[in-house]
Image (cartoon, helix red, strand yellow):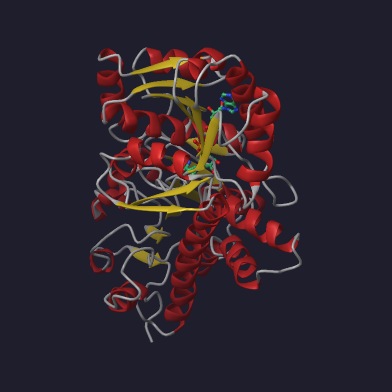
Amino acid sequence: MKISIIGTGYVGLTTGIAFAKYGFNVVCVDKVKGKIKSLSNGVAPFYEPGLGKILKKLVDERLIEGSTNLEKAVKNSDVSFICVGTPSLPNGLISLEHVKDAAKDVGKALEKKKGYHLVVVKSTVTPLTTEKIVLALIEKYSKKKVGKDFGICMNPEFLREGNALNDALHPDRVVMGEYDKKSGDILMKLYRNFKCKKMRTKLRTAEMIKYASNSFLATKITFANEMANICEKFGIDVYEVMKGVGLDKRISPYFLNAGCGFGGSCFKKDISAIISASRSKNYTPKLLETVLDMNETQPLQIIRMAESVLGNLKNKKITLLGLSFKPGTDDVRETRALSIAKTLLKKGTKIIAYDPKAMKNFKKLAGHRNIVYAKNAKAALRKVDACIIQTSWEEFKNLRPKDFKVMKTPVVIDGRRTFDNTEIFAKNGIVYLGIGWKNFAI
Ligand code: NAD
């Protein structure tokens, strides 16, 4: 079976690589020529650990190729995955512009194709989108009938950026929403070499599983943040507390890491979308609204900590280490670094920023004005009043107390509990404050 992937972003490319690695011939389509040129040269168009190496190998072995010709790619394949973006609209709902364009173009290509074809929606879409919108557009533009000429599935993606390749190759589970048994059987065949739990269900249930999963994960992090803010008042280390909490099998230790809030392209977008979709059906999900509200205020804890040590932040020089929304990626979408930087700039603080991978993308997001970008972490720390760690990159974990001694006043404010040994700072005359850390002795 040959596979075409429509949309060669984080999801499309890693999905394509995973299927190619398991022996299928894959063509990845994108309308951005630069991405396809990069892919065709065996170079990943974005940073993700391990992706470049495996892509080069698969391109050399001719198992994966890039194309801007959607029609040809669909006509020459048996299955097409729609992996285009579904960005947020101002009203919280998702924009279906790219999904609709892709569905129309797949439909037009299918009109000219002989034989059965399976279309799989992998983009995150709110319940009923696949059956009411994608299916209808494909029928309209192909002039063909679902169930007879083509099949349709909804196969949500759960990969984590920073670990995308591993997650695509070895997922925890594969969820397959199917229009009918024939569609589901074909998708099952594609996933036969993936050693994980597989669940077959209805199209709309598969769509909802994605939203329910991300809502739960974001709620779990927000819960840990709430506990952190309480712990701090009592001089208790929240990381020790969550270690104890996570020992409970019903809870598990994952996603209990308190910090300065979650970022990334998915959590906020997905939760906003499911809130808006629920409201359109006259239900207000209060818990999810609170999760989003709390996530906006959580980065301010960092500013409050800086003020508790330095007083007025006007004209103070503060280093911001880590600009990507998490380690292992150059993605800065919804990064908490932006909220922190904006608040500091409003207060008249001078910012020296550094990130090992995300500086180029952050410059586009935050602009150059009033932010000085350093060439490495050690250079960023020179003669500053405090340092904020927003992303716990390995490079920052390796910083030693002596590296912070070059600061004007050695104050480390850790938004991500970057260091295993936090006691070492006080022993070296460095002020260390962290989210949910026992900042103030009681
Ligand atoms: P992305 O923005 O990185 O990539 C989308 C790609 O689709 C872009 O390269 C764009 O040029 C291309 N595209 C758009 N319209 C097209 C068209 N008509 N024809 C061909 N190409 C087209 O997006 P992403 O992060 O890969 O996310 C894709 C979807 O998967 C979204 O719905 C997202 O919510 C979901 N998702 C993302 C992640 C993640 O961690 N990034 C995880 C799970 C699910």
Near-viewer residue (34 or 13): 13
Q: Quadrant of residue 258?
A: bottom left
Near-viewer residue (394 or 215): 215
**At which x and y percent is residue 329?**
40, 39
**At which x and y percent is residue 294?**
59, 67
- Please give the name of the residue rendered at 70% of the width and 52% of the height, measured from the top-left corner: 92
Q: Is residue 193 above or below residue 388?
A: above
Q: Is residue 47 visible?
A: no
**At which x and y percent is residue 49?**
31, 35
- Please give the name of the residue rendered at 29% of the width and 41% of the height, measured from the top-left corner: 166
Near-viewer residue (339 or 295): 295
Q: Is residue 64 above or below residue 395?
A: above
- The image quadrant where one finds the C terminus is bottom left
Q: Is residue 92 left or right of residue 75?
A: right
- Please give the name of the residue rendered at 25% of the width and 15% of the height, measured from the top-left corner: 61
- Please give the name of the residue rendered at 60% of the width and 60% of the height, measured from the top-left corner: 296
Count the labels in the image: 0
Q: Is residue 83 left or right of residue 40?
A: right
